[in-house]
Image (cartoon, rainbow, N blue to C red):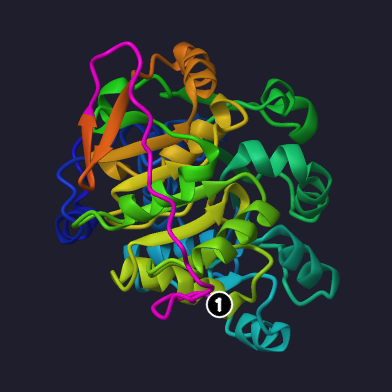
């Protein structure tokens, strides 16, 4: 399928040469009103996949006709901006927690056609009778694996307020057990489009493992951050671990930012802007905060520790190499971690290569066991990093 005429200018502007497999496969079913479960790799253009047929179906000045549900505030705003750009004639408004609810109520009086929001704020405004769903014909649930696993009750309560016969489209990079019971929970028949094994689309991502001790992981991250023309997203398992290592890095001369759901909305926005605008090459985060985020040009994902499972690894790695571009995923750990990660990635046929870090460069290691990265112990004398972004 070729790029629809209405979106050729958008694709040229963003340097996209063709539709991705998921965009080509779901366009007709969604345009014809089918309810769909769409599975595709992270970074494969799922927002455009549901956005293009949606903006061609929704009618201007018809009131709220489409709801897009996102798992996080940042992802909701990101999706809102994409939908707006696809069709500037439509009013597309974001409803997220943490924002001024009175201002949101005022904006709803302008009768936007498309709403993008987080489930808590959407349901709150429906309960207050400020968000009217009587004209809704299309519902998109992005990151459906986490949304339906963690928020099924809230999602079903919201959908129960919509008149019957609406189109429901679920998009995800991984499978959740609940997907086997979709007809039971939503009383609809779904067309399943599964393109997760489209390996050629993810061929631009290299998966590396760098052997180092726990004591030296922060030193490794610091060196990786100083590589030229590289932007790095570092994943930690929890907010507690994230802030522990952020405090440690305050004593290092490395400019960094922190993206965490516990931080105020303005601070999170500033952290993302710092990385996107190349004011820092290092953003520390967690899975919850960064899930689904599209950070244009992100070159490197760093796993400070092994991910808990393959699903987590896939979602993390999807922050780089988006829409067919190149990227790299670097996991830090010891020999045991290396063997464990190899076994974890085997079902997905992901090739893991050992690398060494020398003079701020990654070198492939062909030996059976890569040498450890070692560092001389430095005395910090408690000096703080004057250039650090997040305090």
Q: Is 2 on the left or on the right of 129, as rendered?
A: left
Q: Is 186 on the left or on the right of 290, as rendered?
A: right
Label 1, residues with CA under 10 Å away: few <14, some 14-19, many ≥20: few
Q: Position of residue 111 (x, y in %)?
A: 59, 78
129 up-or-down from 229: above or below = below
Q: Position of residue 219 (x, y in %)?
A: 41, 51
Q: Is 391 on the left or on the right of 366, as rendered?
A: right
Q: Position of residue 317 (x, y in %)?
A: 42, 38
- In magenta segment, residue 390: yes
Residue 244 vs residue 2, the one in the foreground: 244
Q: Secondary structure at mark 1?
A: loop
Residue 285 vs residue 379, the one in the foreground: 379
- State the count of labels: 1
Quadrant in the picture for the N terminus: top left
Q: Is 123 on the left or on the right of 213, as rendered?
A: right
Q: Measuring 63% from the left and 44% from the top, which residue is drawn there? A: 237
279 up-or-down from 336: above or below = below
* Extent of the magenta region: 364-391
Residue bearing the label numbered 1: 391
Quadrant in the picture for the C terminus: bottom right
Residue 389 in view: yes
Residue 302: image quadrant is top left
Prevalent SS, magenta region: loop
Q: Measuring 74% from the left and 52% from the top, which residue is drawn there? A: 163
Q: Measuring 58% from the left and 84% from the top, which residue is drawn there? A: 110
Residue 326: image quadrant is top left
207 up-or-down from 388: above or below = above
- In magenta segment, residue 347: no
Residue 335 vs residue 183, the one in the foreground: 335
Residue 49 in view: no
Residue 169 vs residue 153, the one in the foreground: 153
Q: Measuring 57% from the left and 71% from the top, which residue is drawn there? A: 94
């Amino acid at each position: 399928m070729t790029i629809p005429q209405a979106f050729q200018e958008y694709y040229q502007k963003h340097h996209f040469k063709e539709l991705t497999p998921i965009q080509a496969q779901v366009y007709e079913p969604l345009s014809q009103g089918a309810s769909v479960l769409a599975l595709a790799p992270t970074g494969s253009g799922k927002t455009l996949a549901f956005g293009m047929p949606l903006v061609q179906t929704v009618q201007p000045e018809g009131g709220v006709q489409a709801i897009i549900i996102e798992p996080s505030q940042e992802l909701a705003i990101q999706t809102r901006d994409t939908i707006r750009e696809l069709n500037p004639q439509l009013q597309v408004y974001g409803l997220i927690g943490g924002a001024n609810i009175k201002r949101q109520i005022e904006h709803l009086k302008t009768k936007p056609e498309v709403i993008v929001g987080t489930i808590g704020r959407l349901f709150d405004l429906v309960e207050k009778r400020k968000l009217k769903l009587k004209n809704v014909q299309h519902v998109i649930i992005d990151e459906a694996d986490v949304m339906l696993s963690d928020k099924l009750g809230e999602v079903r309560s919201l959908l129960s307020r919509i008149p019957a016969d609406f189109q429901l489209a679920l998009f995800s990079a991984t499978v959740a057990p609940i997907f086997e019971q979709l007809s039971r929970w939503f009383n609809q028949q779904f067309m399943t489009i599964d393109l997760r094994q489209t390996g050629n689309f993810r061929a631009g991502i290299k998966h590396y493992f760098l052997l180092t001790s726990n004591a030296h992981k922060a030193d490794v991250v610091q060196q990786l951050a100083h590589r030229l023309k590289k932007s790095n997203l570092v994943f930690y398992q929890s907010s507690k671990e994230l802030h522990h290592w952020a405090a440690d890095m305050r004593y290092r001369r490395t400019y960094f930012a922190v993206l965490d759901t516990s931080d105020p909305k303005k601070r999170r926005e500033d952290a993302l802007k710092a990385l996107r605008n190349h004011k820092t090459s290092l953003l520390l985060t967690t899975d919850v905060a960064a899930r689904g985020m599209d950070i244009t040009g992100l070159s490197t994902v760093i796993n400070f520790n092994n991910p808990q499972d393959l699903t987590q690894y896939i979602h993390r790695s999807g922050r780089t190499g988006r829409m067919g571009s190149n990227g790299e995923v670097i996991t830090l750990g010891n020999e045991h971690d290396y063997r464990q990660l190899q076994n974890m990635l085997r079902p997905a046929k992901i090739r893991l290569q050992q690398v060494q870090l020398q003079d701020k460069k990654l070198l492939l290691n062909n030996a059976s066991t890569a040498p450890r990265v070692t560092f001389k112990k430095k005395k910090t004398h408690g000096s703080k990093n004057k250039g650090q972004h997040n305090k």
